Image (tube, rainbow, N blue to C red):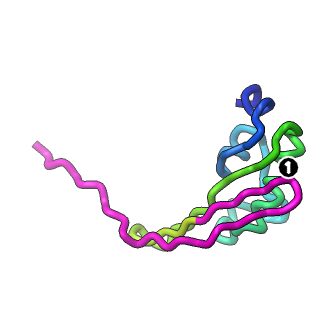
Amino acid sequence: MRKCQAFAAPLLGYLEDAKKYFGINPEDLNITTEGNKLNAPAFLSICKQMMDKFPKAKKVITTLRGSTSTSHNSWSGIMYDGIKMYVSQKYQITDIVAEAQAPMV
């Protein structure tokens, strides 16, 4: 993964990817105890760290997903261009359909 990212202009991923593959965590936020506080500003430090690690990157793009319940999630997009962070509107997704269970035979 690191070899591929070294040549990428846009970096696309999520918080778990930054942590798992590159050891990058948000500054001033303990994900284990404060994961419910993840918001767009918390991702700014991740974006900056990714651009520091991969200087050829022109943009870092990620999603901000929230889970209110099994049938209610929120979703927004984030893009950082090295100067400014852009955040989309937050979408409330409430028409989640549960996966059907196959009958036991």
Q: Would residue 95 be found to the left or right of residue 42 on screen? A: left
Q: Is residue 95 magenta?
A: yes
The x and y percentages for residue 69 are 45, 71
* Point 14% across, 49% down: residue: 103
Q: Is residue 94 magenta?
A: yes
Q: Would residue 23 be found to the left or right of residue 69 on screen? A: right
Residue nearest the viewer, comparing 55 with 65: 55
Per the image, label 1 sits on a secondary structure element best described as helix
Q: Is residue 102 above or below residue 85?
A: above
* Point 85% across, 49% down: residue: 49
Q: Quadrant of the N terminus?
A: top right
Would you say the magenta stretch is mainly helix, strand or loop? Answer: loop
Q: Quadrant of the C terminus?
A: top left
* Point 66% across, 46% down: residue: 13
Disc 1 marks a residue whose amino acid type is: Gln
Q: Is residue 17 above or below residue 72?
A: above
* Residue assigned mark 1: 49
Dividing the picture into quadrants, the one containing residue 46 is bottom right
Q: Would residue 98 be found to the left or right of residue 50 on screen? A: left
* Point 59% across, 72% down: residue: 90
Q: Give the number of callouts.
A: 1
Q: Which residues are magenta?
A: 76-105
Residue nearest the viewer, comparing 16 with 49: 49
Q: Would residue 84 be found to the left or right of residue 74 on screen? A: right
Q: Is residue 42 above or below residue 9?
A: below
- Mark 1 neighbour density, 10 Å: few (under 14) some (14–19) many (20 or more): some
The x and y percentages for residue 87 are 70, 67
Q: Residue furthest top?
A: 3
